[in-house]
Image: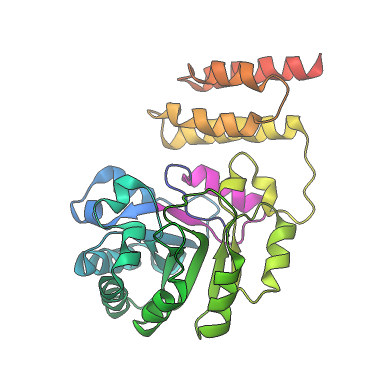
């Protein structure tokens, strides 16, 4: 599955990942509070990709009734295209945790359980939760916390094997995930350090119902493919497609594509030249010119 990534999982990116083998995709993290205020920019995050038969919407917030109400509204709006609602209790970003959202909920098991219970009561679709190993640097509260949200009615839990204070440093601790598989009755999804189909396939043997790939998919949708072979020109072709299709959906925000394009060219000869050029791109033609120049460099 394509993991939820804020500022990355636009519909075009999700579409490309599906084309390359992602079996299920998550939206970006969506603020339940912003939805309740009818924020148009936030509502746009619920837009589906053109080849997305099913999508998982990930909500965040710390007010049980607000999250539950917006989860119910999303269920009504997306209907059969909604696979399930996932509640984010793992995001470590300071701007999220300082408001009591994301991984800050790992410090408040009672509130976390109330959020799950409220969503389960409000919705007919499954409610899942994404967590981390713990909040503080060296703690592991994942089993106790996961059992609490299981009792509250969660249909599955996804664990990222790092604490919030670790962010993405160090190695994800697989042991905490394996403990959840052994001790919980609900399915467990793994997230952390998965960068290929082969690695995901190996982890499935540990008893996880599904495996997420997140950061490794940036600029590399081939990570979802069983027999992935591609050239630098293939990456440039997909990057061009991403830019063109993104402009059709969001014509006023093409600066967003700068980071995606940097990920596509990472490791290529001429990547430094391209990154400098991308930083000034504002139109489709701007991006195409950079890619064409980069192609010439690769061929010479």
Vertical order, 122 against 199 (above or below): below
Vertical order, 123 against 192 (above or below): below
Residue 298: % across, % down: 77, 19
Residue 157: % across, % down: 47, 72
Q: Nearer the viewer, residue 11 or 150?
A: 150
Q: In the rendered image, which quarter contains the N terminus?
A: bottom right
Which residue of the protein is positioned furthest toward the left in this rendering?
Answer: 37
Vertical order, 146 against 168 (above or below): below
The magenta stretch spans which residues?
9-28
Residue drawn at x 39%, y 75% as measured from the top left: 145
Residue 250: % across, % down: 41, 34
Residue drawn at x 30%, y 53% as measured from the top left: 97
Q: Is residue 226 left or right of residue 35?
A: right
Vertical order, 242 against 169 (above or below): above
Q: In the rendered image, which quarter contains the C terminus?
A: top right
Q: Is residue 27 magenta?
A: yes
Quadrant of the rendered structure where residue 23 is?
A: bottom right
Q: How many marks?
A: 0
Residue 87: % across, % down: 37, 65
Q: Nearer the viewer, residue 259 or 82?
A: 259
């Amino acid at each position: 599955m394509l993991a939820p990534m804020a500022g990355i999982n636009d519909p075009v990116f999700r579409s490309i990942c599906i084309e390359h083998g992602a079996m299920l995709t998550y939206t970006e993290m969506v603020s339940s509070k912003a939805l309740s205020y009818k924020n148009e920019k936030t509502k746009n995050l619920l837009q589906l990709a053109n080849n997305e038969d099913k999508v998982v919407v990930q909500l965040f917030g710390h007010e049980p009734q607000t999250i539950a109400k917006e989860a119910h509204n999303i269920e009504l709006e997306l209907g059969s295209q909604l696979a399930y609602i996932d509640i984010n209790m793992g995001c470590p970003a300071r701007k999220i945790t300082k408001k009591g959202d994301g991984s800050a909920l790992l410090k408040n098991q009672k509130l976390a359980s109330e959020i799950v219970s409220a969503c389960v009561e409000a919705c007919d679709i499954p409610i899942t939760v994404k967590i981390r190993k713990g909040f503080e640097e060296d703690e592991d509260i994942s089993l106790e916390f996961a059992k609490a949200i299981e009792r509250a009615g969660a249909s599955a839990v996804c664990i990222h094997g790092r604490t919030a204070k670790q962010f993405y440093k160090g190695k994800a601790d697989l042991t905490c995930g394996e403990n959840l598989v052994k001790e919980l009755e609900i399915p467990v999804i793994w997230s952390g350090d998965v960068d290929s189909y082969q690695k995901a396939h190996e982890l499935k043997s540990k008893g996880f119902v599904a495996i997420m790939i997140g950061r490794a998919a940036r600029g590399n949708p081939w990570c979802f493919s069983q027999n992935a072979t591609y050239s630098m020109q293939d990456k440039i072709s997909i990057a061009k497609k991403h830019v063109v299709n993104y402009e059709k959906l969001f014509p006023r925000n093409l600066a967003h594509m700068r980071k995606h394009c940097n990920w596509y060219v990472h490791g290529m000869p001429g990547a430094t030249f391209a990154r400098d050029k991308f930083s000034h791109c504002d139109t489709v033609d701007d991006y195409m010119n950079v890619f064409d120049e980069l192609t010439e460099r690769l061929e010479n």
